[in-house]
């Protein structure tokens, strides 16, 4: 079965269709989405607008980069401490 990838805008639109009163099963069938995916999206994106979702994605990416920088810095610090310990 081919997997589909939906953009944040498409996901928000699908969620809004369900909020408008259409049954979840009908919305899922119409867009070829499983119920589990729909409820996962609703938990993650429920109540957000497209601009808020884009901001959330930017913040998550920034957080990922900061975590990577912190890990590299801690690794360098540990390596330098090991070098100092070996010289003593």
Image (spheres, helix red, strand yellow):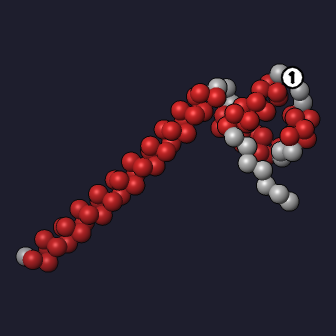
Note whether 74 is above or below 35 in the view shown.
below
Q: Is residue 84 left or right of residue 67?
A: left
Numbered disc 1: secondary structure: loop
Q: Image point 86% across, 22% down: which residue?
A: 21
Name the image quarter holding residue 76: bottom left
Residue 13 in view, yes or no: yes
- Residue in the image at 79% along x and 46% along y: 36
What residue is disc 1 on? 21
Left/right of residue 44 with respect to residue 81 in the rendered view:
right
Query: Up-down: is 47 above or below 60?
Result: above
Can residue 42 be seen in this snapshot? no
State the image coordinates of residue 38 (x, y, percent, origin top left).
Answer: 78, 40
In the depicted view, which residue is nearer to us: 8 or 80?
Answer: 8
**Residue at point 42% right, 49% down?**
65
Task: Locate the C terminus by quadrant.
Answer: bottom left
Q: Position of residue 84 (x, y in %)?
A: 13, 71
How many numbered dots are placed on residues in this image? 1
Q: Quadrant of the N terminus?
A: bottom right
Coordinates of residue 48 in the picture (x, y in percent): 64, 27
Q: State the image coordinates of residue 35 (x, y, percent, origin top left).
A: 83, 43
């Amino acid at each position: 079965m081919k997997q589909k990838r939906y953009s944040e805008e498409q996901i928000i639109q699908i969620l809004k269709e369900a909020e408008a009163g259409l049954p979840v099963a009908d919305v899922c069938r119409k867009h070829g989405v499983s119920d589990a995916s729909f409820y996962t999206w609703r938990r993650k994106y429920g109540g957000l607008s497209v601009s808020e979702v884009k901001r959330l994605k930017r913040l998550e990416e920034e957080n990922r980069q900061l975590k990577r920088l912190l890990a590299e810095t801690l690794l360098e610090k540990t390596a330098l401490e090991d070098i100092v310990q070996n010289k003593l």
